[in-house]
Image: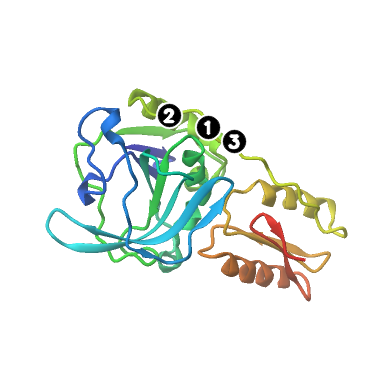
């Protein structure tokens, strides 16, 4: 496990196993940690294949060592194929406003999960107790897993957003940890940024933001515009939700906004 800490706040938690929930055993050498992904029981949404990766929103049913059955709100991301793959567990931080915890979703970390999947990992993002739609207790406990803590340099105005940055920002601090365990560090499946034309009437600033939208790997994303005003969002639970939110934000500055792009595809 490696924690990325910034300005005295833990902003992300990356674990190579979750021994306390018996998802995978962490004992032994690196080869024993290269295991097939767990088999969650209930898909929330149909699996999607994006750029050579399978992505599934799942209810992940797990039995704790004390016999308690719990259900994790989770996103599973893995390369297409049967594996086996090293398994990485991604966990989240805490927002300042406790009221926003229930609306959090594992797709908030879709891009981070893909950063690992592109290096040959299977990645599971899960929500802790009190977050999203999880019913489980906090499952991070001592389970014999290797662990490390990295104190990051200050990042922008709020270090909580470090893990939301592009992978090249935070991966250099994760790579040494996984390398010590004999696990992959290099990108095996690079992403080609889609080539989509921005709305023709957008300003220079709007065209620049559309470029940022295309670079985002938070595939539950949408870009809305009325031809002049624009807004985009990512990290929503579904693409439909992303489209609705992008339109609502665009309407704050414009009129008659519609979704221009959802995911990496134009819709009009």
Image quadrant assignment for residue 233: bottom right
Q: Is residue 165 visible?
A: yes
In the image, 3 versus 55, the foreground residue is 55
Q: How far apart in space, not on screen, are marks 1 and 2 (Cα)?
A: 9 Å
Q: Which mark is residue 184?
A: 2
- Under circle 1, the secondary element is loop
The crowding category of the residue bearing disc 3, from other C-alpha atoms within 10 Å (few below 14, some 14 to 19, many at least 20), is: few
Q: Find disc 3 in the rendering and name its residue.
A: 190
State yes or no: discs 1 and 2 in contact (Cβ < 8 Å). yes
Is 69 left, or right, of 134 in this rendering? left
Residue drawn at (78%, 75%), measured in percent from left and top? 255
Query: How does the figure colour the protein chain or chains?
Result: rainbow
Residue drawn at (52%, 47%), measured in percent from left and top? 53
Q: Find disc 1 in the rendering and name its residue.
A: 188
State yes or no: discs 1 and 3 in contact (Cβ < 8 Å). no
Q: How far apart in space, not on screen, are marks 2 and 3 (Cα)?
A: 14 Å
- Under circle 3, the secondary element is loop
Given the current orientation, which residue lies at the most extreme front position? 82
In the image, 10 versus 243, the foreground residue is 243
The crowding category of the residue bearing disc 2, from other C-alpha atoms within 10 Å (few below 14, some 14 to 19, many at least 20), is: some
Is 231 left, or right, of 175 in this rendering? right
């Amino acid at each position: 496990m490696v924690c990325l800490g910034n300005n005295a706040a833990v902003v992300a938690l990356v674990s190579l196993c979750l021994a306390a929930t018996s998802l995978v055993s962490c004992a032994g050498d690196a080869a024993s940690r290269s295991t097939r992904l767990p088999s969650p029981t209930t898909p929330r949404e149909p699996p999607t294949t994006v750029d050579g990766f399978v992505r599934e929103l799942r209810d992940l049913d797990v039995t704790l060592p004390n016999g308690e059955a719990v259900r994790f709100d989770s996103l599973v991301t893995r390369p297409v194929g049967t594996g086996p793959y090293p398994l990485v567990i991604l966990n989240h931080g805490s927002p300042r406003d406790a009221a926003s915890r229930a609306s959090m979703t594992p797709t908030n970390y879709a891009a981070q999960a893909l950063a690992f999947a592109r290096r040959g990992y299977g990645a599971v993002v899960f929500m802790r107790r009190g977050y999203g739609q999880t019913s489980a207790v906090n499952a991070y406990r001592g389970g014999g897993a290797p662990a490390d803590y990295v104190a990051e340099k200050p990042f922008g105005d709020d270090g909580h957003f470090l893990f939301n940055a592009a992978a090249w920002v935070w991966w250099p601090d994760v790579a040494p940890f996984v390398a010590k365990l004999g696990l992959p560090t290099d990108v095996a499946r690079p992403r080609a940024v889609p080539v989509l034309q921005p709305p023709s009437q957008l300003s220079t600033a709007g065209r620049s933001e559309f470029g940022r939208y295309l670079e985002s790997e938070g595939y539950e994303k949408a870009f809305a515009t009325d031809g002049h005003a624009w807004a985009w969002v990512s990290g929503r639970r579904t693409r439909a939700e992303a489209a609705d939110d992008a339109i609502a934000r665009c309407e704050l500055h414009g009129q008659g906004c519609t979704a221009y792009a959802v995911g990496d595809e134009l819709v009009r």
